Image (cartoon, rainbow, N blue to C red):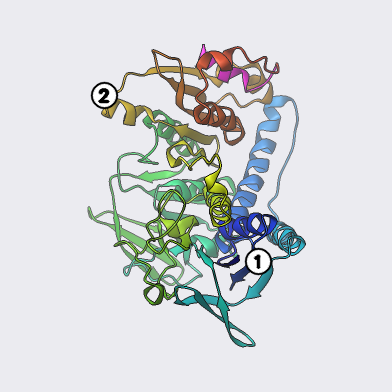
């Protein structure tokens, strides 16, 4: 079985390692960085910068814990740290692929026909035959015509990891996950930040109580929230960037970051040559096996139009390899994207999984909602950070856990308990009956489940 994969991000490299392990002859084509440009050049650097900002926050809180400390940001050292993390992770992926016998080609791949792939490399053009093809080329930042990105004062998210200098006043356009992470990141590193919010709350697709906690933290930090305003014009005048909104307001800053979504990298893949269709947004529609309309051509990751999460992409890649090698004929569980856990690495952290409260009530579903604040948790008080809460949604008749949200310290780790509960259809009683550590933040999960 010749499996050719175009794109070496979480979907592509996972499919490659699992496919090779199952006996496929795998060729992986990547034109930038094995491990995924979005993952290694977006996700990892942003979280590294957020971790640095978090460490500064810990130093500032130290006085309240009986310590005196002072912190100074070394931007050059931060840059070296980010590059070191990227290189380590990239090399780890490459080593794993090499150990599995995966052939890696550095170049740009595209379809020539249903079973033919062309690769353009520095040495020339190579043609490959494929029994199955996985397309996993990810996405890129959406850049509106009114925003003249110059990479200096007007930046995409990827151009800000880290910036040449910490902005004195950063304007962030976009209040989704990426936008609020940038707002938190740069405000924690000392920038004045204005967040342009097109609706009446940040994180418009999240629980209103969750968004309210984050907004309170932003306001405490001095972040200006420009609500109910959609950016429609951006100009740079020397060292000043001005953003105008559709209601006539404007804000000026030293830098601006665009965090207004992404578009799939499907336009140069030769899809027409293989008969692969895309939707009106450029995504490749897939079935439960990640198959496109051409059954031996698969799509995964951002290109598939499903949840743009590295964890989801990796799971899709694993399922593709199993399907290619025929394992779907055995007991096989399809991915349930509604049960995917997600996290936002602000301070406090935000994480959720499964059914949302507003969504449930909009559908008229009966729901049991319980919430416990971390201010009643011993470990949170010991750590000096009792912000946030645990909220669990369950079926009032059966007790089955349907979803949950966590706002607070280590929320991204704690949500894993609820993710397992949702996926395995555990009852709230199963969480209550678990003998958890004391003192620990996880105790609030059991309290919320009672």
Q: For the residues labelled 2 and 1, say whether their Cβ atoms are less than 8 Å apart.
A: no
State the extent of the magenta-drawn residues as a range. 439-450
Q: Where in the figure is residue 329, as x and y percent of width and height?
A: 53, 46
- Residue 112 badge: none
Label 1: how many Cα within 10 Å (few below 14, some 14–19, many 20+): some
Q: Where in the figure is residue 117, as x and y percent of width and height?
A: 52, 76
Q: Where in the figure is residue 169, as x and y percent of width and height?
A: 48, 55
**Towards the viewer: 254 or 356:** 356
Q: Secondary structure at mark 2?
A: loop
Q: Which residue is mark 2?
A: 364
Residue at the outermost front position: 329
Look at 67% across and 14% down and name the residue there: 435
Q: Quadrant of residue 125?
A: bottom right
Residue at the outermost left position: 247
Task: Look at the picture and state if 422 lies above or below 290.
Answer: above
The tag earlier along the polypeptide, 2 or 1, is: 1
Q: Quadrant of residue 127?
A: bottom right
Whether residue 255 can be seen here: no
Residue at the outermost bottom position: 124
| Residue 208 is covered by the magenta coloring | no
Look at 42% across and 38% down and name the residue there: 338
Callout in the foreground (2, 1): 1
How far apart marks 2 and 1 lie (CA) works out to: 50 Å
**Towards the viewer: 214 or 422:** 422
117 on left or right of 244: right
101 on left or right of 272: right
Task: Look at the picture and state if 353 lies above or below 241.
Answer: above
Look at 66% across and 55% down and name the residue there: 22
**Towards the viewer: 207 or 49:** 207
- Residue 25 badge: 1
């Amino acid at each position: 079985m010749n499996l050719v994969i175009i794109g070496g991000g979480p979907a592509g490299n996972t499919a490659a390692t699992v496919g090779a392990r199952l006996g496929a002859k795998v060729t992986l084509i990547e034109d930038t960085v094995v491990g995924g440009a979005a993952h290694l050049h977006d996700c990892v650097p942003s979280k590294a910068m957020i971790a640095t900002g978090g460490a500064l926050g810990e130093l500032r809180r130290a006085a309240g814990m009986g310590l005196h400390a002072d912190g100074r940001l070394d931007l050059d050292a931060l840059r070296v740290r980010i590059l070191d993390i990227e290189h380590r992770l990239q090399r780890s992926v490459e080593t794993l692929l090499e150990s599995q016998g995966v052939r890696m080609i550095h170049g740009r791949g595209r379809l020539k026909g249903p079973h033919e792939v062309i690769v353009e490399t520095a040495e020339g053009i190579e043609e490959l035959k494929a029994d199955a093809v996985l397309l996993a080329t990810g996405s890129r930042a959406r850049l509106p015509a009114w925003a003249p990105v110059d990479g200096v004062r007007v930046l995409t998210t990827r151009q800000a990891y880290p910036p040449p200098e910490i902005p004195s006043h950063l304007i962030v356009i976009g209040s989704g996950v990426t936008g609020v992470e940038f707002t938190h990141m740069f405000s924690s590193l000392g920038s004045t930040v204005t967040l342009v919010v097109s609706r009446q709350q940040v994180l418009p697709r999240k629980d209103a109580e969750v968004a309210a906690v984050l907004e309170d933290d932003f306001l405490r930090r001095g972040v200006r929230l420009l609500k109910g305003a959609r950016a429609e014009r951006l100009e740079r005048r020397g060292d000043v960037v001005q953003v105008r909104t559709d209601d006539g307001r404007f804000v000026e800053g030293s830098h601006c970051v665009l965090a207004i979504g992404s578009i799939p990298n499907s336009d140069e893949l030769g899809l027409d040559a293989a008969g692969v269709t895309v939707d009106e947004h450029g995504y490749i529609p897939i079935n439960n096996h990640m198959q496109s309309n051409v059954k031996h051509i698969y799509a995964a990751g951002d290109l598939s139009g499903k949840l743009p999460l590295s964890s989801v992409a990796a799971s899709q890649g694993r399922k593709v390899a199993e399907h290619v090698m025929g394992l779907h004929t055995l007991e096989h569980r399809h991915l349930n994207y509604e049960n995917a856990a997600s996290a936002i690495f602000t301070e406090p952290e935000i994480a959720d999984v499964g059914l949302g409260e507003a969504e449930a009530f909009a559908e008229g579903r009966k729901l049991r909602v319980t919430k416990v604040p971390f201010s009643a948790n011993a470990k949170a008080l010991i750590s000096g950070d009792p912000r946030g809460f645990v909220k669990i949604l369950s079926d009032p008749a059966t007790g089955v856990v349907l979803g949950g949200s966590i706002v607070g310290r280590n929320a991204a780790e704690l949500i894993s308990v609820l993710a397992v509960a949702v996926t395995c259809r555990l009852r709230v009683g199963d969480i209550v009956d678990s003998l958890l550590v004391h003192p620990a933040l996880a105790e609030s999960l059991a309290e919320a489940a009672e």
